[in-house]
Image (cartoon, rainbow, N blue to C red):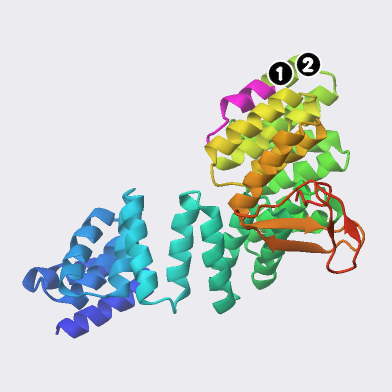
Amino acid sequence: MSEEIISSAKEALEEGRPHDAIVVLEPLVEQDDEDVDALVCLGMAYVQAEMPAKAVTVLEQAEELAEQHCVIELFLGRALWALGKIDYAEDKIREAHRLDSSEPEVWLDLARILYRKNEYREALGYLQQSIEQFPTELGLLGLYALTLYRLGDFTAATDEWAKVHRLNPDLMAAVSNYAYLLLIQNRSFEAAPFVGHANIVDPDDYRAQILLGELRFQSGEHDGAKECFIRVIEDDPVNIEALSRLAVLAHMARDTETCRRYLERAEAELGRNPESWRGLCDVYPLLGMSEEYIECLIRWTKSDHGAAAPWVALAFQYDKQGKLEHARNAWRVVFELRGYVKIQCSGCRTVSRQSYDETTGFDVYQAIVCQACGAKINMPVGLAVT
């Protein structure tokens, strides 16, 4: 009888009906609290039903009864994560990964928790390994792209979102992130069809309006851009990207007071989420506020301490201002956070990524030779900033 109940509960879980599974499993566990299969299934049901505290109770009980059980460790890790016990959750998920790494979800959970902890370099390593085994797994590819983005490797992140988009053309996360990355690299001509597609997939999604506004802004259609950004803040008055762009549009229209109001509203939201920093930081140069730009980037490095993206911008800005020692130090941090040095040859346009050895370092003012075409690559000009 218990086997039939557990089988029906598993079927309910596969169909996304965790409460139905809980109804039949709880009496079974009350009758026999040492039935490992019933405990594990009930724990999974509690996790799926977003009842993490109950999940931890039954899964820890199952853990005492059955050692070396990947599923118990994985779902216990998920439940602890939901309760905010991040370090304990990481231990359990790492144990699940050690016991059985043959399923993509174990890799994904481990990479997610490292990403959540801002440990992007380590997350990148696991994601690279996992994608070799599961090259079409959308969750892994998407998280890989997000991690590359945090590390400031926009061209690589763009390539990964392109793969996700090809695998699922109507996935809004893929099309919007792909278009967004193209836009922040000023590749508006390439971005245009994907911005259009995003507005077809979900025209009411704020991301579609942000993308359309940015495309119009870069194309010089300032009135149309303003219309899009105003529509965004009507629905979301604290959207930092829209507020920042409206400040720039007001600045270009020489409306100093309106520019100041929008900028103050945007600055008030700074730090609300990791993306807020990029949304605001990139606006300061357009407003001629170079010192504020530097300050914003420095604050960004402290807020998202594992991200290389703000350090890349800082290094470029310091070099532009002739602060060579500051630039050198910023590039060193970039290399340490990424674990590699990204170089682009101005001659053949080949991009290479060389492993970074913290012992020997890398001299950003020493020219090197392109391995593809043999041309001399001057530094730091050859260091890719996107």
Q: What type is the residue that disc 1 sits on?
A: Arg
In terms of depth relative to the viewer, which is nearer, 179 or 231?
A: 179
User: Overall secondary structure of the magenta stretch?
Assistant: helix
In the displayed structure image, the side of residue 4 where residue 230 appears, left or right: right
Residue 161 found in image quarter: bottom right
Q: What type is the residue that disc 2 sits on?
A: Thr
Dot 2: within a 10 Å radius of its alpha carbon, few (fewer than 14), some, or many (20 or more) residues? Answer: few
Dot 1: within a 10 Å radius of its alpha carbon, few (fewer than 14), some, or many (20 or more) residues? Answer: some
From where the camera sits, is residue 282 visible?
A: no
Q: Residue placed at 62% from the left, 63% from the top?
A: 171
Q: Position of residue 205 (x, y in %)?
A: 63, 48
**Residue at label 2?**
256
Helix, strand or loop for disc 1: helix
Of all residues, the one furthest to the left in this rendering is 31
Residue 56 belongs to magenta span: no
Q: Position of residue 137 (x, y in %)?
A: 56, 72
Image label count: 2
In terms of depth relative to the viewer, which is nearer, 139 or 338?
A: 338
**Residue at label 1?**
260
Q: Which residues are magenta?
A: 262-272
